[in-house]
Amino acid sequence: MSYRWLLWILLASLTGRPLLSLVVVLLVWWATDRFTFQLLPDPFRWLARRKRERQLRRLLDANPADRRSRLELAQLLLDRGQPAEAAALVRQNVEAGDEDLHTAFALGAALARSGDRQRAEPVLDVARRLDPAFRMGDIDLELGRLRVRAGDLAGAEEPLRRLVAARPGTVEGRWLLARALDGVGRREDAARVREEAWREYQGLPRFRRRPERPFAWRIKPWRPALVALLLLLAGAASARLLYPTVAGLARDLEGSSQLDE
């Protein structure tokens, strides 16, 4: 029995509305997470992005030649994990004559995340020639991800080292680089890179930790296990301390309701 379960029992006993109490507990849990670990998703951000997607689709229905809206929609789809649809949209802009940096990067990233390495790498190379430092190494990050997924660990080292040089605080970049070094047998170098990644993660401000947290926890997998254990122990201790009080309150309320009847 966790502290959230006890809180629900207490609220349900006081209000007589278990469903409302459950909603309150979930909101308190979510609000606490937003100010601490930030592990739970942000529904407001998700809703805003989906609303923007619908707006862009309506704009494109009204004006199919609106290439700026098409590119923005493709970027939103790419962020949402829909690279195939994003690639199809950006390809329409390329066929219409767009050759700018943002279009090249969006198409290359969409093809890379779709697993189409043969077509993704030339497009990303075009974007890199236009601006090697685009978004502090985003092009090299896509190349590194693509090559690690494809098993080309030796080929992944060069773009990932460029990424780490351009973006010293990247935990994901160092985690990928450590995987590449491990894959080519350089265990000591990989261990050193993982230690650097963990130090960088610890030094990041809170607002930058959330996107890097999954990779930091892969470097130190015992960390989330320890956090979960501590929360479980805290919940168990709270349950042991509060259960007699909550149970007594519930009995008193039940007795009062029977007397009223």
Image: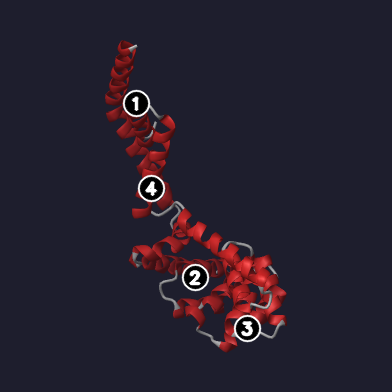
The image shows residue 171 at horizontal and vertical percentages of 45, 67
- Which of the two discs, 2 and 3, sits closer to the camera? 3
Q: Is residue 226 left or right of residue 43?
A: left
Q: Secondary structure at mark 4?
A: helix
- State if disc 2 and disc 4 touch (CB < 8 Å): no
| Crowd rating for badge 1 (residues with CA inside 10 Å; few <14, some 14–19, many 20+) | many
Q: Residue at x 69, y 74 (%)?
A: 64
Q: Which label was assigned to residue 13?
A: 1
| Crowd rating for badge 3 (residues with CA inside 10 Å; few <14, some 14–19, many 20+) | some
The three-letter amino acid code for the residue at tag 4 is Val
Q: What residue did someone put label 4 on?
A: 227
- State if disc 3 and disc 1 touch (CB < 8 Å): no
The image shows residue 163 at horizontal and vertical percentages of 49, 77
**Marks 2 and 1, Cα distance to the nearest angstrom?**
50 Å
The three-letter amino acid code for the residue at tag 1 is Ser
The three-letter amino acid code for the residue at tag 3 is Asp
The image shows residue 69 at horizontal and vertical percentages of 60, 74
**Marks 2 and 3, Cα distance to the nearest angstrom?**
19 Å
- Mark sitting earlier along the chain (4/2): 2
Q: Secondary structure at mark 3?
A: helix
Q: Which image quarter is the C terminus in?
A: top left
**Marks 4 and 1, Cα distance to the nearest angstrom?**
30 Å
Q: Which label was assigned to residue 125?
A: 3
